[in-house]
Image (spheres, coloured by chain):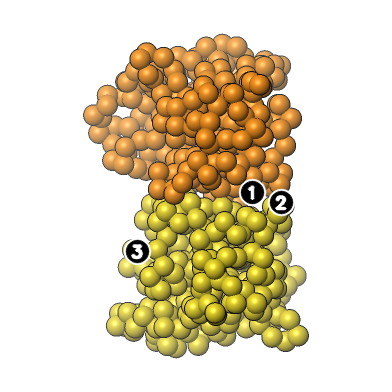
Chain colours: A yellow, B orange
Amino acid sequence: MSANVLFGKPCAEVIYQALRESAFKGALYTIGFDAPQWKQYTYSLENSGKKCGIRTRHIYLRQDCAPNEMFETIDSVCRMHDAAGVLLEQPLPEVYQGAANRIVPQMDVDCLTSRSIAAMYKGASGIRPATPSAVIRLLDFYDISLSGKHVVVVGRGTVGKPLALMMLARNATVTVCHTKTADLPTVCKTADILVSACGVAGLINKDFVTEKTVVVDVGLSIVDGHSVGDVAPEVCEVCSAVSSVPGGVGPVTRAVVFENLLKISKAK
Amino acid sequence: MSANVLFGKPCAEVIYQALRESAFKGALYTIGFDAPQWKQYTYSLENSGKKCGIRTRHIYLRQDCAPNEMFETIDSVCRMHDAAGVLLEQPLPEVYQGAANRIVPQMDVDCLTSRSIAAMYKGASGIRPATPSAVIRLLDFYDISLSGKHVVVVGRGTVGKPLALMMLARNATVTVCHTKTADLPTVCKTADILVSACGVAGLINKDFVTEKTVVVDVGLSIVDGHSVGDVAPEVCEVCSAVSSVPGGVGPVTRAVVFENLLKISKAK
């Protein structure tokens, strides 16, 4: 028996539909490095913007740019007359620490400023980071309930950590695993919902799941020129449902970025 | 066989010793409600302060005080010439939302401001909340390693949530349980280290532990005039080690409050 596949496009389309109806004016600015993977992401974001009539502007910095150069770029983008929100590449090298808090909190589309992080931590109102939001939106779209479920998150980075907090707020029991976890397959097998966000191609194989597991794959690696997730194809033969890669969490994430843009603009 | 008991006093004494050597001048101000449990805590804190020669000043507000009255009290305390830090009662009713961020970040001894919370979330330098810090200090004091261990935290409140983040930063695999968790005993039994911080007297009984479990009891309820933890006495008959209640996490927490006071004062 083969698992149900969770596709992101129909879920994203619902978000785009609402965005088109809002007829939002104002642009999303992205700031990141002049490097293939980030540029690829910004191109996808630009296409996503077109689906809901929202403009995107991209600023690419040299990979060796001085911290102050980045900080000043963020400051000046926040003053642009058409800028409604700023998306900053994540994670950034340690030397750029402090960059996130240069974003004007009202323009923070990805929950990067201390104010937004604290609101998320406390479960207060406000926007949430796009990728973990997309994981939850995708599960909601497919009517997979979270309350009382055991969610195991693999990865404690810019996706795993906020996702853990957000899943707790949705009344899931949450386990966070990482490189130091002893016996990862056994822990993962206890999950009702297994979310992998560690970026290790094919890490999650059929020993990590049961026939009841719903698997969400947030990983994205490039192997031999192909986009590959954290979840090995063989997992489909065992588990209950698995998100598509590509075409799963990714399209929903991009839609959520624009939805966040609308939310913060309304809150101003 | 009976479990080893983890006592807080010798661990706290190490912290007090360092504080006495620092000969710190400057007072700790507490702000909370004029209610028995908080007053009791502030008295204990005052006694703890005496152990390291640090003064405490307590401000008790009426339980029906207007939010603005609390906010202005915080503002004026932060301006006191002898105030080195401010400890605000937690958790506060919803109506006082915003109180924590009235504390000047440099005077925040308990990681309540957005800036401190974001630093904790990111694993950046800065102080951490006293109670979860005390849990980790107690385990460190008894040479109980955390890296690679499975830590199950019962409770997702002002102790459970920060503790989860701090345990992740110490390379533990972390599970957070709460009132909506299905089959709590089974989840707790998977723990190497079980921390209960839910304030339900005697919730953790011998069905929740194995002979390997180290149990830390952060709960404190008053039952028939006695201080009672979350952990039932019968647990001692089964588990490997258990913290004393009272006399376990509590004394370490109070010592950490003063240690935090010294840390934020040095960072100014």
Disc 1 or disc 2, which is closer to the eye? 2
What is the three-letter code of the residue carrying label 3? Lys
Kindly identify the residue that appears in the image at 52 percent across and 12 percent down: B47
> Which chain is disc 2 placed on?
A
- On the image, which quarter does residue A24 sit in? bottom left
Toward the viewer: A214 or B255? A214
Marks 1/2 in contact by CB < 8 Å: the verdict is: yes
**Do marks 2 and 3 both belong to one polypeptide chain?**
yes
**Do marks 1 and 2 both belong to one polypeptide chain?**
no
Residue designated by label 2: A182
Q: Residues within 10 Å of mark 1 (few under 14, many from 20)?
A: many
Q: From what the image shows, is residue B236 above or below residue A105?
A: above
Cα–Cα gap, marks 1 and 2: 8 Å
Labels in figure, total: 3
Residue B85 percent across, percent down from the top left: 52, 28
Image quarter (top left, top right, bottom left or bottom right) of the N terminus of chain B: top right
Toward the viewer: A218 or B29? A218
Residue designated by label 1: B173
Disc 3 or disc 1, which is closer to the eye? 1
Q: Is label 2 in a helix, a strand or a loop? A: loop
Q: Residues within 10 Å of mark 2 (few under 14, many from 20)?
A: some
Residue designated by label 3: A268
What is the three-letter code of the residue carrying label 1? Thr
Toward the viewer: B133 or B61? B133
> Which chain is disc 1 placed on?
B
> Image check: B232 left or right of B14?
left
Which mark is first along the chain, 3 or 2? 2
Marks 2/3 in contact by CB < 8 Å: the verdict is: no
